[in-house]
Amino acid sequence: LLVSKDLGKHLLEVEDLLQKHGLLEADISAQTERVQALNAAALKFSELEGYQPCDPQIICNRVNHVQTCLEELEELAAKRRKELEDSRQLWTFFQEMEEAEAWIREKEKILAAKTCGRDLSSVMTLTTKHKTMLGELGNRRALLHQTMKKGEKILAKKSFSSVGIQEKMREVCLRWKKLEEVTGLHQQRLEDALNFFQFSAETDDLVAWLQDMYRIVSSDDFGHDDYSTQALLRKHRAVVEEVEKHRASVLSLRKQLALLAPNHRQGVDVQIRVVEVEQLYGEVAEVAVLRTQWLQDALAVYRMFSEVHACEVWVDEKEQWLEKMEVPEELDEVEISRPTFPAHPKADPGGPHPTSGWGRSHPAPLPVPSWNRVVELVENKKGQLSSVLKIQNFLLEC
């Protein structure tokens, strides 16, 4: 048993041989105690005086021979244990390498079957799973490094043929390197897909925002008076500022598109989408400018209406005053009333005109019939006052 060359053909068999060898060592240890006791008893016979049943030299030689055989047996047992321990290290190394290869094959199949997702949510889910796999890859890398060190130690002992060990180490290293390359490529594809779907999502959000802005700036609500139109104009200016802030985002779409992976940026759909965003932004900006002008024009119209209304009120007041005015008969009262009328009533209705501040580009139309009525009343009252004045002057001279 101790000189057997059978060191096992796999780890389980080696473990079984080690277990059996442990029992054998226990048996040898038990027999050693018995042999030591027998040797001690035999040596006592060699020391007897008088009658000696056996030659003391023969006894000593026999004891030495038994002790030598026992020591040789113990040496063989120790040698056998060392060989079995080395065999266990070897087969443990091979088993760990087999496990590493099996894990590599499993991950290769997973990576070969994986897609890069169909939308942003699925890509983010796959990215999370890939990060988990990268953590496993790091742990496996550390374990494989330890196993490689074990293989190097086995090679350094030169107890077994180095061909199989070196071949296995080289094979696993190549497969591991290939796995890391495939993992890196898959990670790059995921990053490219993530960038593409993020770009698509941002583009969709920008399109939705521009469509909302287009509905706002293309509104046909221009207010119903001066106050409401001014409020709409203030809101519209805030919208124009927001549109202008998004100009940089629209202009950067081309740069972002150029940074995408070739298989993504060369797609017809994404290029058409970018053109649609640019065109929609141009339309929004153009309509926003037009709405600004339309609101300003509406504000000018409502201000004109307000000033026309003020003019009408002024004319009505003058008309009522002239109709109620009584021509005095006394000279003193006539002299007081004369300065009330202007020298040229057709040119000036008698005071600062409410539309005097209106710009040349937006002349406020006067209420012509009412104005003519006021001029007519002024002329009549002036004629009456002149007649009274002439009569009073004539009476005064007489």
Image: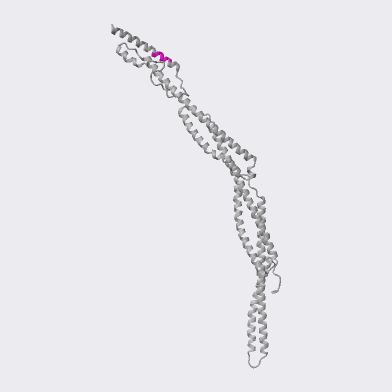
Q: Position of residue 229 (x, y in %)?
A: 48, 29
Task: Report the residue that reaches farthest toward the right.
Answer: 5
Left or right placement of residue 362 versus residue 157 in this view: left
The answer to whether residue 286 is seen in the rendering is yes
Q: Residue at x 52, y 31 (%)?
A: 289
Magenta-colored stretch includes residue 126: no
Give the overall secondary structure of the magenta segment.
helix
Region rendered in magenta: 372-378
Q: Relative to 397, does residue 74 appear above or below in the rendering?
A: below
The answer to whether residue 122 is seen in the rendering is no
Task: Report the residue that reaches farthest toward the bottom.
Answer: 50
Placement of the C terminus among the 4 image quadrants? top left
Q: Residue at x 67, y 50 (%)?
A: 113
Q: Relative to 212, does residue 118 appear above or below in the rendering?
A: below
Which residue is more in the foreground, 75 or 265?
265
Q: Position of residue 265 (x, y in %)?
A: 63, 43
Which residue is more in the foreground, 397 or 174?
397
Q: How many marks?
A: 0
Quarter residue 72 falls in? bottom right
